[in-house]
Amino acid sequence: MTTPEVWAPQARRVESLTDGTRKQLAPRGDGWWHAEEPLEHGESYAFSLDAGRPLPDPRSRWQPDGVHGASRALDHAAFEWSDRSWRGIAREDLILYELHVGTFTPFGTFAAIEDKLDHLLDLGITAVELMPIAEFPGSRGWGYDGVDLYAPHHSYGEPGDLKRFVDRCHARGLAVIIDVVYNHLGPDGNYLAEFGPYFTDRYGTPWGSAVNLDGPDSEPVRDFFIENALMWMRDYHFDGIRLDAVHAIFDASAVHFLEELKARAEELERILDRRLLVIAESDLNDPRVVLPRARGGYGLDAQWSDDFHHALHAVITGERTGYYADFGAIGQIAKALQHAFVYDGVYSAYRRRRHGRSTEGLTGHAFLGYIQNHDQVGNRALGERLTALVSGDLGKVAAALVLTSPFIPLIFQGEEWGATSPFNYFTDHNRELGAAVSRGRKREFAAFGWPEEQIPDPQDEATFVRSKLNWSELEDPIHADLFEWYRRLITLRKSVPELCDGRMDLVRTEIDEVARWLLVRRGSITLACNFSEHDVVVPVRADERRTEVLTSALKPPESVT
């Protein structure tokens, strides 16, 4: 049962609206108001501040009619879990698979993903990472403009469907991580500012007002977001969270929001007796995010490492525009494998300043390695995947480097079979906001020389439909061969201890920028990569025990014993 309560420190009167009946909430102190009677599971309600219009509950657990509709009471205790023996997955055993619920299957629901669990298990995946699923406007979108952060998006299914999905993943040995967005909220359906000082003009983000985490009345705001993270892990049994763009989470407090969130997650971890992970995305190349709190860091478990992606992408594609201007040397791939950050305090021509800091003393398990993800694919003008940019064999080279790296590997949906469907940016905003988004998208890429008529319209439903995976491609021998290559690499990673130890300090590399080859040695494994357009000779020692060698970007991979 749900007892309505809400933080509204500036209101003089707060009422709940249920079935057309208004009931006044009682002030509890510190700006909180609460109802005297609980609501039954499934009962609809809304709040009214000072006799104003009905508003959804800021902590609504269920928004079946979207961001502007009434909230619905949810009894979390009503669901029967079967994963009582589940204890989570250790960080070093993670092989992550990022997916978008709406485009991963033709049906685009939580329930539909369950039919693909055999595929993920056959591949060797150990953890699924869902792109944001908190209630956002419309019926389709990436989810980074969510506004009802406590409610699963209605078009993906009901809250019980999400719980059933997580429960069945755990039954199959798969962990599940959820992507959350705490640096801003979307503009459509965002009613938080009417309830209290959730936002501040002291800082700014590229996507909207910054969250008030360190100003007056910020304690309930901090709790709102921290409790949201805990809810996903406690009530939905998620094994962790991935925090979007923490460089846009501004907090000058002595105890940073990220540090407090991690500490609270550790408390919950002890209560649940289950491993809980907190992973961040940051473009600052600042190891403070993952440094232990005893060393002055925030103590998060891991962070996305774009430098490894950028270094690898620039070499195999030849692209040098935007942030790729800082990359292109094979030696940068080698540096990333040994230090995670290529820019660790050195000058960045793209930023026109020094960037980053050394990762000395940190394990590779504190960083994620990938060659594709939703950003690096979807933020391109046409949403092209790597298969549209490079030869299949170069794609195999990239996959081998990711899956034998000292980092936590991440695969983006469909990457494992070379999916040809793009992953475009798509939205379903109201007419005014949607038109503005469409114009902005076209202007953004027109500035880089793309004809406007070639830029997919985010608001066009066809853009969303084109982004859905075509699972029949797995029946094609070329796609099946790439899937088998990924599967073999993951099997290799799991079977060789040196590939799972996270020891960046033990990675040994040799390079030839002119001949364009790279050798990577990790214990008993030697990886030979040819980035040139012709055969090359690389100095693999005769006395080395080579379990797997990728000998050419132009020829099929060979197994060498």
Image: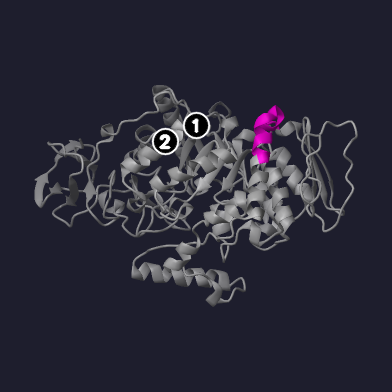
**Quarter of the picture holding the N terminus:** top left
Which residue is at the front of the view, 539 or 480? Answer: 480
- Residues shaded magenta: 488-503
Residue 414 bears which disc, if any? none
Res. 421 in view: yes
Is residue 465 located in the magenta-colored stretch of the structure? Answer: no
Circle 2 — which element? Answer: helix
Q: Is residue 204 above or below residue 230?
A: below
**Quarter of the picture holding the C terminus:** top right
Residue 173 bears which disc, if any? 1
Which residue is at the front of the view, 264 or 394? Answer: 394
Magenta part, dominant SS:
helix
Looking at the picture, which amino acid does disc 1 mark?
Gly
Which residue lies at the image location 82% right of the left edge and 59% below the top edge? 533
* First in residue order: circle 2 vs circle 1: 2
- Can you give x and y, in whole percent of width and height, for residue 159 in the image? 32, 43
Which residue is at the front of the view, 94 or 369? Answer: 94
Q: Is residue 110 above or below residue 547?
A: below
Looking at the picture, which amino acid does disc 2 mark?
Arg
- Can you give x and y, in whole percent of width and height, for residue 111 in the image? 39, 45
Is residue 493 located in the magenta-colored stretch of the structure? Answer: yes
Circle 1 — which element? Answer: loop
List the residue tagged with mark 2. Answer: 168
